[in-house]
Amino acid sequence: MSFLQPLILIALPLMALPVLIHLINQQRHRTIPWAAMMFLMSAKRMSRGMARLRHLLILLMRVLAVGALIFAVSRPLSGGWLGSVGLSKPDATLILLDRSASMEIQDLQAGESKRSASLKRLAELLEQGDYGTHLILIDSATGQMQEVDSPKALLNLPVTGPTATTTNIPAMLETALAYLKANESGRTEIWICSDLKENDWDIHSGRWNAIREAFAELQGVHHFLLAYADPPSSNLSVRVENVQRWQRGSNAELVLDVMVRRTDGSTNTRQVPIEFEVNNVRSVVEVELDALGASLQGHRIPIDGKLNSGWGSVRLPGDANPLDNRFFFVFSEPPVRKVVVVSDDTRVGEAFSRALAIPTDVRLQHRVDVIPVSRVAEIDWESTALLVWQAALPRGLVAEQIAHFVNTGRVAMFFPPGPGGAGEQLFGSQWRNWHASGTETVSKLSWWRGDADLLAHVESGEALPLNELRTYRYRTLESTGTPLATFDDDAPLLNRVATDHGAVYFCSTLPTAQFSSLERDGIVFYVMLQRALTDGSRSLAVASQRDAGLDVLADREQWTAVAPEEDTASLSEIGLHAGVYQDETHWVAVNRSQTEDGAAISSVEAVDALFDGLSYRRIDVDVGDTSALASELWRIFLIAMALALIVEAVLSLPSRKTTNGRQGEGLEGANLA
């Protein structure tokens, strides 16, 4: 229990006042022995037990009445989170707000989203209590700290509004840790508002151990999780992928894939209209939903043959989450997909050239240049989409050029050099010794990631035949990257190194027959390289699709918002909202990431385990629940005081039997006199 006026509780010792008055009152009368009263005293002792109990109850009711009055004046609060909060006020209150697209799921009757409901209820709670000297907001979209004047201001700040971004809870807690350590804050309350999406919490990340240990070293830090974990009862989300513009003589058309995801768990089929808009021209197509949703593969939209680039969107009817009902896309003529293979081994270079020269679509143009290390200075980095490096890791100017190449959104794949070539480090990775299998055994993969990235399942849902891959020699790799495929001894076959833009991969074997069956089997090798080339080519196109984020539009300075027309986002948040932006000849469509649509909700047990050993309380809330997080109990204590006084009054009334007994005692005393 907590109190809005805790200083009033200093008066609790006044509960002893009735007892003190009773003891003083007993000392007012002196006892004088009188022989004539001995018979009356003997008769009175027979009823003294019940009388004493009644007097104790009267005294108890008076004590309770005083205590209830003191508690009522101190304005107590009730709430599930209050059991772990002491009576002292915090020095600072930190609010970690999830502004991701999934937090915009609404209760259609209440008309409030998870984000707005959590802000409103938290502001009411902090207004009732004392939030300390500093009220700090850390929002998921910017990751930055901002001091807030009052809890009510949380409801109107631009940095608490909805966005199309994702959330990184570990990073927000690390920001909170940095603030607490830098300011040496004392007692602190940290409020986390979240819908517990798996991609937001990243439960299996190694960062959590360090975060938990760092908070354990701080004294007086209390964590509260305002959890909106209820899934939407009825919600559809739409996505667009593989947008391509093809010219057919004087005419042109757009070819795209549309996916509608269903989350209500129903197996009933129903028709849903999908509205297409291309440069302000609208059309509607109805699709039939099954238990998972619906898809339109290779949907064609005719456009003017003179329209070389532009934008469009796909829209669903309104439902529980307005932020996932529309998806923007942009299009342009496909660029030439250029690859540079750097290798001094002619056979290895030819293997890469054969796999990369054949496009996945005959309408695409591929160009593959195989050069030795000595000709690296000839590379045209601006027109290259994919770099395949099979040599010792570079250093100096070439390493800087590759880093810049990746930072502009391209893809670099590194394969092990021949003998030697170890010791150099790049992107937190370096090659070690070669590992050769025995004469009668080969190394096989024990695990690979099939849900995403280069080794993901194909569109039909079938897995790549990685279990058939044979590896005879591979080079051990020391890397800070994440394995995408590992051998039986946990050594990685393919690693991806985290980068802000673009992608970096390290493959520990070579495609020729001396090292593996990659080229001979062909499918895995071809798909892996073509996917890397597709990813790298996106940054070469005049039009590109990007996930919403703080720096998503940082590559150019003069982006102009094209759609939606009602978008009024400030310049500081222009990349945080879904829409279409243009800079001279370049187009960008910004949308929520795919994980926002497909990520599951983490179990509350798994989230609770992240705070094991810390002062922590979870508050489970439904989006439609508008009740306050804490309510005042002073009325209950006033009622308790009134009841105590009534009981005291009833007990103080003399009973008929007691009165007659006293009259008899008086008459008997008179006769004896």
Image (cartoon, grey):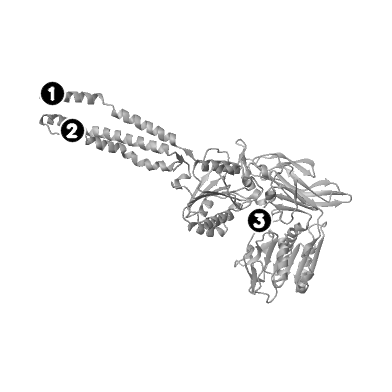
Instruction: Name the image quarter holding residue 652.
Output: top left
* Helix, strand or loop status at disc 3: loop
Residue 422, disc? none
CB under 8 Å between callouts 1 and 2? Answer: no
- Earlier-in-chain disc, 1 versus 3: 3
On the picture, is 241 further left or further right than 35?
Answer: right
Report the quarter where the N terminus lies. Answer: top left
Instruction: Name the image quarter holding residue 115.
Output: top right
Instruction: Say which of marks 3 and 2 sits in front.
Output: 2
Instruction: Say which of marks 1 and 2 sits in front.
Output: 1
| Residue of label 2 | 45
Image location of residue 129, percent across then percent down = 49, 43
Q: Amino acid at mark 2?
A: Arg
- Earlier-in-chain disc, 3 versus 2: 2
Circle 1 Cα neighbour tier, 10 Å, few/some/many (<14 / 14–19 / ≥20): few
On the picture, is 295 further left or further right than 249?
Answer: left
Image location of residue 485, percent across then percent down = 64, 63
| Residue of label 3 | 451
Circle 3 Cα neighbour tier, 10 Å, few/some/many (<14 / 14–19 / ≥20): few
Q: Is residue 604 above or below residue 397?
A: above
Q: CA distance from mark 1 to mark 3?
A: 104 Å
| Residue of label 1 | 670
For the residue pair 476 and 535, the one nearer the viewer reads as 535
On the picture, is 621 further left or further right than 351?
Answer: left
- Earlier-in-chain disc, 1 versus 2: 2
Q: Is residue 96 above or below residue 284?
A: below
Q: CA distance from mark 1 to mark 2?
A: 20 Å
Residue 380 visible somewhere in the drawing: yes
